[in-house]
Every structure is written in structure tokens, then in C-alpha cells.
Image (cartoon, rainbow, N blue to C red):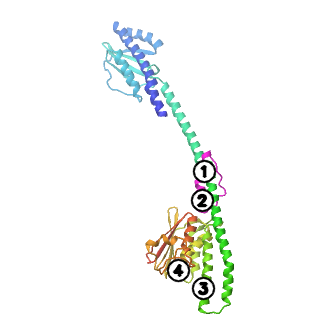
Amino acid sequence: MQIVVAYIFFNAHWSTVTASLSDSVAADVSLAVELFNQAPSPERAAKLNEMMQPHMELSVDLRDDHDFPTAQRRSFFSTLDKTLQRSLNQSLQSPFWFDTTRYPNHIDIRVRVDEGTLTFIAAKERVFARTGFVFIFWLTLASLLLTMISILFIRNQARPISRLADAADAFGKGQDIDGFRPSGAAEVRLAGQSFLKMRQRIRRFMDQRTDLLAGVSHDLRTPLTRLKLHFAMLENNEDNRAARSDLIEMEKMLDGYLDFARGQTDEDTMTVDLNDFLKDIAQKFKPNTPQLDLTGNQSVQIKPGMMTRALNNVLSNAVKYGEIVKISSRTDKHTAIIQVEDDGPGIPEENFKEVFKPFYRMDTARNQNIEGTGLGLSIARDIIRNHGGSITLGQSELGGLKVEIALPD
């Protein structure tokens, strides 16, 4: 907008004023040349100087040298040279030359006459509208001032949006955002309030799911306990042993359901050293302790109890179905990568997505759960997503399954 205003100013008002001033000076120079040609002499030139310098701010001098300048020296603002050139062409019949750059506050105009060269020195204010520089100064100052105000205003408006984005990111990672308060413009506050309402609805849904399954598990434990007691008092034959085994399996299934429902807990988020955390988990799988290949020194924000449960589910499968288990870690930009590999039978690639479904069980040599319920990887994925991460499956170089977990720092 400022550039458009400046363009209109310089091509309309400023150029018009400068052209009028140039025409006035050119007319004065033309008059002086005509008066000099009526009686050409040094005395006539001196008389013209006495007449024109006090009243017109135009000095006149006759020089005897006939070396008329030819080199052109253009000013930074070419408009001045163009308008003065046009005005002098219209007013003078004799050859002329001018220089607008030699003197800071004056213009040198020279006209060839038979007796030599008439040299005119005119004040630049008479030819050039100085208000253009003032206009540029105030235009630049106003632009800088408005730019600073705009930056401050935008930063103040963007800060609440950044806080809302940080809160959404933290909520996606399962972190506490109780300190978040909507602020900023009305639209931003409305978005923040909607986000808090959505958070409350999600937490209410998760609590209802946990309470429902916990209640179902509690209600079913009583009849299961009675049945276990009843079969314990019966004869120890093959049918009774099979029935007791089924009861134990049902109890494990109830525990798995409850673990799946507790995908989100009120556990506090902590910053831990990833390599130390993985070492502690690996030590629990003695004597078949997984091999460790840990690199970097990555710190991650996790809920230790939940993440321990997720990694235990993954490692339990690897240890159960493979003789060689390897845990590796590395850092990729702002993401921590954990890989668990084994040399077991693996999983067909077409089943990679299916095994993450709750209660999914494969009819192959490898069963994807730790309690026989088909919830091991479902619980692990639920926990990892709650931390803002991801879990994927692939083929291991060891010949079995590779589980890759990505966690933000």
C-alpha cells in the first residue's frame, strides 16, 4: 500500500510540481539569454547578475572559454534531469548543458553564446521539489512504526494459539494440562474452551470404560471363586482338571480385559533416560535376558508404569517365541526409536494390522498375547499412542518379528 501511495505521489503531485519549477527556471534562463543577446558584453552579463541574483536566486556569469561541457552526469532521481531537460529544450534555442549533481544545493546550467558561455547557478529549491524527501522520510517512518505494531499485535494473538497447540500436543502424549487456560481473541478462547470440553468428554469416556470393565471383572470373580472352590473339592480326574484349567484361563482373560480398559491412568509423566529404562526392563527377563544395543543419550517423557507394561507385553512375546532377542535404541531428530527383534517364527506381513485388534488370535504357531486373551499388542499400542508415539511391525534380520516403537522426546 505504501509503495502504491509513493508511486502515485511521485508520478502525479511531485512530478507536476517539479515540472512547474523547472519551467520557471528555464523561462528565467531563456529571458536572461535574450537580454544578453540584445547587447552581448561582459558588462551586460554583470548587469543581469545584479538584477536576477537578489530577486530570482539566479546568478549569471559570462566565461570566455569556449570549452563547452559534453559529459552528462545524471542525478539519483532521474525525474529531475528529465523535467529540466524538457523545460530547457522548450525555452532555449542555443546549445545548453546542465549538471544537477556537482553542487549539493545548486544547479549548474550553461548556455553557449557567441562571446563564450553563459553560466547560470540556480538554487535547487527553485528546480526541485524538496518535499519529496520529506514525504519519503515520513512514509518510511510510518511503515516501520506500523510494521512494529503489526508484529507485536500478531505475536500477542499467536501466543495463545501456540499455547493451545502445546496443550493439545501434551494431551495427545498423555501429559497433564491442568494449567492450561484459554486466552487471546474471542475465537481463540472459544477454540480453547472447546478443546477443554473435548478433553473432559474423552476422559469421562475412558473412566466409564474402565469402571464398566472393572465392575464386570469384579462381578465375575465371585462366581469364578465359587467354581474354583467347588472343583477343588471334587475328584482329581481328567474332566475336573480340564474344568479347573478353563476357570484359570477365564480369570486370566478377566485380568486382560481390565488391563486393556486401563489404557489411560492418572500416573504422572516423568522424564527418564531411555537407555537406563530399557536396561531395567531387560533385567527382568532372566535367564533369557535380551541383548542390548543402545546408542545415544535420549531422554523421554513417559508414564513409567504404563510404558513398562507396554514393553513387557512386547518383550514377553519375543522371549516366549524366540531364542535370541535383541533390544536396540537410537535417536532420529526429536524422536526416540526402540526396536525389539527376535528369531522366532514371526508373523506374515498380511497380518501386521490384524494383530493389533483387540482379542485377535492367530491360528499359527505364534500367538500374539501374553495371557491367552489376544490383548498383548492391543494394550501396548494403546499405551504408546497415549504417549503420542507409534508402534509398527516388520521382518527382523534375525529371521523373526521386529517391533519398532517411536516416542517423541
> Is residue 185 among what the camera can see?
no
Report the front residue among 58 and 161. Answer: 161
**Where residue 170 is drawn, which disc sits there?**
2
Say which residue label 4 marks: 319
- Circle 1 — which element? helix
Say which residue label 3 marks: 245
Report the front residue among 300 and 208. Answer: 208
Q: Are marks 1 and 4 in contact (CB under 8 Å)?
A: no
Residue 55 drawn at (x, y percent)? 47, 12
164 with respect to 33 (left or right): right
Residue 295 drawn at (x, y percent)? 51, 70
Residue in the image at 66% along x and 56% along y: 179
Q: Nearer the viewer, mark 3 or mark 4?
A: 3
Say which residue label 1 marks: 191
Q: Which residues are magenta?
A: 164-187
* Amino acid type indicated by mark 1: Ala
In magenta segment, residue 80 = no
Q: Quadrant of the C terminus?
A: bottom right
- How far apart are the two marked residues, 3 and 4, measured between alpha carbons? 24 Å
Q: Nearer the viewer, mark 2 or mark 3?
A: 3
**Above/below status of 8 relative to 383:** above
Q: Earlier in the sequence, mark 1 or mark 4?
A: 1
- How far apart are the two marked residues, 2 and 1, measured between alpha carbons? 16 Å
Q: Quadrant of residue 185?
A: top right
Q: Residues within 10 Å of mark 3 (few under 14, many from 20)?
A: few
Q: Earlier in the sequence, mark 3 or mark 4?
A: 3
